């Protein structure tokens, strides 16, 4: 929790309790279903929670926005973002149901009310639209945009002109030159090491493709 509070402040008592409870809950579930590598559990808050919150450092999700976490896995970035933005609804989608069981149980354990899960492939979701799709290291950018674009609302839910445009926000690492070229997109890119001054974030990036 200290790692998060190094970069963020003004959490409510409830948010502090929720963030604090995460490591023990994930450690317990990890003994039953492997959702996080054992070596990463020692750096749980930096490698998973803070990494997810790079999105919150650059983007403000407003009340009643609908955000889908594509390929959520064990709940990242969706769970930390749902704690950070309690007035935004997060829908966590993954094709592996056992991981979503962990997500559901952890969300229930910390009293997270703005989070739902769905066992599905993104391309099979036909009846819902979202303001934003978020994702962390799930697939090449070309595929992420192909899956996300049909799921995005064409108009913004909010009249707040300072809020982010509808689109895809994703976390990626390594040399992105070829991947961005093959996607045919022109994403905005931020180096996360300039957001959080930790060696772990070297060559890790935050990308945003707005829906035009």
Image: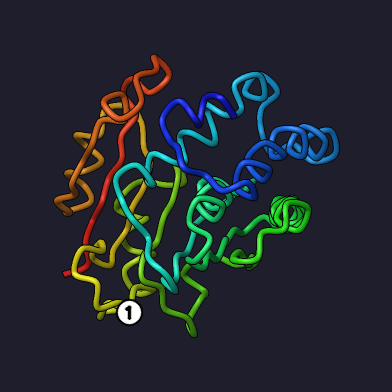
The answer to whether 74 is drawn above or below residue 146 in the figure is: above
Residue 206: give x, y in percent of width and height. Answer: 31, 40
Residue named by callout 1: 157
Q: Quadrant of residue 23?
A: top right
> Which residue is situated farthest in the top direction here?
199
Which residue shows up at 33% across the image and 63% down it?
A: 146
Q: Is residue 110 left or right of residue 7?
A: right
Which residue shows up at 59% across the image and 21% down it?
A: 43
Which residue shows up at 79% across the image and 41% down it?
A: 33
Which residue shows up at 41% across the image and 55% down it?
A: 134
Of residue 97 and residue 211, the one placed in the foreground of this image is: 211
Residue 133: give x, y in percent of width and height. Answer: 39, 61
Residue 58: give x, y in percent of width and height. Answer: 29, 45
Of residue 133 and residue 23, the one placed in the foreground of this image is: 23
Q: Count how many numbered circles sit on residues in the image.
A: 1
Q: Is residue 61 left or right of residue 98?
A: left
């Amino acid at each position: 929790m200290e790692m998060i509070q190094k970069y963020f402040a003004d959490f409510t008592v409830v948010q502090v309790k929720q963030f604090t409870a995460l490591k023990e809950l994930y450690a317990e579930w990890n003994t039953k279903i492997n959702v996080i590598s054992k070596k990463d559990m020692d750096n749980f808050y930096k490698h998973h929670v803070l990494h997810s919150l790079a999105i919150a450092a650059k983007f403000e999700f407003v009340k009643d926005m609908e955000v889908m976490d594509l390929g959520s896995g064990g709940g990242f970035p969706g769970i930390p973002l749902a704690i950070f933005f309690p007035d935004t609804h997060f829908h966590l989608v993954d094709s592996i149901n056992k991981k979503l069981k962990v997500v559901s149980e952890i969300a229930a354990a910390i009293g997270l009310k703005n989070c739902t899960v769905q066992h599905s492939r993104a391309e099979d979701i036909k009846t819902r639209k979202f303001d934003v799709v978020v994702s962390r290291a799930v697939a090449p950018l070309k595929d992420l945009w192909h899956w996300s674009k049909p799921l995005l609302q064409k108009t913004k839910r909010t009249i707040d002109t300072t809020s982010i445009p509808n689109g895809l926000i994703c976390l990626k690492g390594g040399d992105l030159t070829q991947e961005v070229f093959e996607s045919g997109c022109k994403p905005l890119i931020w180096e996360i090491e300039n957001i959080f001054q930790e060696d772990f974030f070297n060559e890790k990036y935050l990308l945003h493709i707005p829906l035009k």
